[in-house]
Image (tube, rainbow, N blue to C red):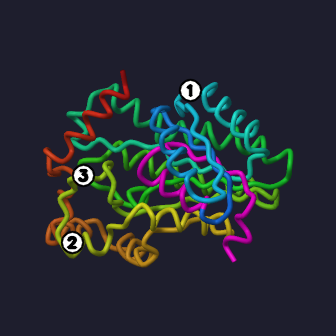
Amino acid sequence: MARQQIAGKVVAITGGARGIGKATAEEFLANGATVAIGDLDVELAEKTAVELAARPGARVIGLPLDVTDRASFANFLDEAESQLGGLDVLVNNAGIMPTGLFTDEADAMTDRMIDINLRGVLTGSKLACRRFARKGSGTIVNIASLAGMTAEAGIATYCGTKHAVVGFTEALRREQHGSGVNVTAVLPGIVRTELSAGANLPGWAENLTTVDPEDVARTVVTAVTRNKGRLTVPASLTATIKIMSLLPERARYGFARVTKLDHAFSDADLAQRAKYHHRLAGDAK
């Protein structure tokens, strides 16, 4: 059923060269869509596109994209439409998650998280909505996070940006209601990618909250086929998050302390985080 609804659609994915973005591109291709991968690392985007194009019948291109630059984002969508046809789906996936205490965070990194995780989503959504308005249909999927529903020490700015993405997505969805444009937020737990490597989770929590990029990718495709405002990955965490939100603050803090969830990111494995932080520093140059 999903393939029938996805086949022939033109999908643009930001941050599509690796991790969730790459898995999402592969899942859309498997369902018959054509895909434009946009990434700051254009060499990797092109390499990923070549790799995914090996699938029989797959049509995928890799393009340069800096989501913090409006002109770059517009050019990405223009080029995707020029090569593949009219855009049907935009997946705002690009995001970064450096870890550490907020007071130790460099101002430049704070600004960069806001620019990529939030402003990039706002820019892409506005550009896509204007395109979709002309045809009366389209889907925007914003990759948020379960950190957009909770508050975790060690990723304060990241949580702030993802809370904003969740709220923005709901508001934009209301604005677009009845227009033919569907707007959805996908909220993954901890995903097994470089972005979350080294999280200091107790075993039981890792089993409950940790998913693979492919799990998120399947949910993104589901978001395009079902008119839902918010989807969590794994879906089982939806009820848990709701229950936790009803608890008083002292109870929530006590639960986090007893279960050792209160330092999952503030006490992350520095050796495992180093590679990711090193790449972020290189991308910023």
Q: How crowded is the residue under tag 1: few (<14 C-alpha within 10 Å), some, or many (20+)?
A: some
Q: How crowded is the residue under tag 2: few (<14 C-alpha within 10 Å), some, or many (20+)?
A: some
- Residue 118 position in % (x across, y down): 50, 41
Residue at left 54%, top 45%? 49
Highlighted magenta segment, given as a residue range: 1-29
Question: Which of these two is toward me, 180 or 107?
Answer: 180
Of marks 1 and 3, the one in the foreground:
1
- Residue placed under numbered mark 2 in the picture: 255
- Residue placed under numbered mark 1 in the picture: 69
- Residue placed under numbered mark 3 in the picture: 153
Question: Is residue 268 rendered magenta in the image?
Answer: no
Quadrant of the rendered image containing residue 150:
bottom left
- Residue 26 position in % (x across, y down): 54, 58
Q: Which quadrant would the N terminus be assigned to in this image?
A: bottom right
- Residue 249 position in % (x across, y down): 28, 65
Question: In the rendered structure, which disc, 2 or 3, sits on the residue that comes first in sequence?
Answer: 3
Residue at left 75%, top 54%? 138
Label 3 SS: loop
Of marks 1 and 2, the one in the foreground:
1
Q: Which quadrant would the C terminus be assigned to in this image?
A: top left
Dot 2 amino acid type: Phe
Number of dots carrying numbers: 3
Residue at left 29%, top 47%? 155
